[in-house]
Image (tube, rainbow, N blue to C red):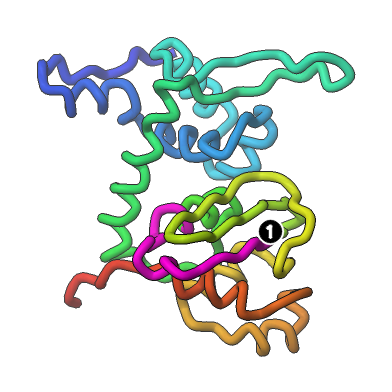
Amino acid sequence: MAARRDYFDGCGAAHALDLVGERWALLVVRELVLGPKRFTDLRAGLPHASPNVLSQRLRELEDAGVLRRRRLPPPAASAVYELTEWGQELEPVLQALGRWAARSLPESDSIKVDSFVLSLRTMFDPARAADADVTLQLVLDDQPFRTRLAHGVLDIERGEVSGADVTVRCSPTVLAGVVYQDLSVETMQADGALELAGDPAALQALVDAVHLPERLPA
């Protein structure tokens, strides 16, 4: 196994890169922000990372104290990876990087579930949601997320919610198109790409509360 490359620099930023600067490391953190995952789940979220490289990054991040590995009790009895409390502190770092890079982000026709959910948390603008008070059930590629938008706060996490104002079922790519590219909900419904049950205004409240930064000049 190749030795980790260090900067040997007393700067805090340099030490941060010693810990999470290797290729795929921060994306592993991204995949775990919303909760624990098995190795196979991480492979699905990072399909371009080879199993050997992914295993190496997991070992390095565990050695650094960023994540830990634990075994679920029966009947699951499988191992999962999860962020430590210190590792969870990297979410604002990922958000800051996401907002910064969004100004030159190239267009893409695909986005993964966790990436999209974290983008909502990153691009959420509390000022645009000061009067909102809605509950949504987002089902993205069959993964449920309970979403609460109330008085300038967005709370979104894995799980189901009862009594939602609206339930939306689609791929993360389709919902990203609605949120960030002004795709029509009605058109997506007509095409069969999106299912909506409940009050469309609740979904619109979420769309209105998310704001991309201004793009850099061409």
Exactly how many numbered labels are in the figure? 1
| Horizontal and vertical percent position of residue 121 | 45, 53
Considering depth in this image, is 196 or 102 the residue closer to the camera?
196
Q: Secondary structure at mark 1?
A: strand
Please, is residue 87 above or below residue 60 in the view? below
**Residue in view at x 71 percent, y 69 percent:** 166
| Horizontal and vertical percent position of residue 203 | 60, 73
Is residue 168 something that shows in the picture? Answer: no
The three-letter amino acid code for the residue at tag 1 is Leu
Query: Of all residues shown, which one is farthest toward the left?
Result: 10
Query: Of all residues shown, which one is farthest toward the right?
Result: 75
Q: Residues within 10 Å of mark 1 (few under 14, many from 20)?
A: many
| Horizontal and vertical percent position of residue 103 | 27, 65
Considering depth in this image, is 89 or 79 the residue closer to the camera?
89
The residue beneath circle 1 is: 140
Q: Quadrant of residue 10?
A: top left
Magenta span of residues: 120-136
Q: Quadrant of residue 164?
A: bottom right
**Residue in view at x 38 percent, y 30 percent:** 89
Instruction: Give the left or right position of residue 208, taking residue 159 as reference.
Output: left
**Residue in view at x 47 percent, y 39 percent:** 30
| Horizontal and vertical percent position of residue 172 | 61, 62
Residue 104 falls within the magenta-colored stretch = no
Q: Quadrant of residue 174?
A: bottom right
Instruction: Give the left or right position of residue 135, taking residue 10 as reference.
Output: right
Instruction: Give the left or right position of residue 43, taking residue 15 as reference.
Output: right
**Residue in view at x 34 percent, y 64 percent:** 105
Is residue 72 something that shows in the picture? Answer: yes
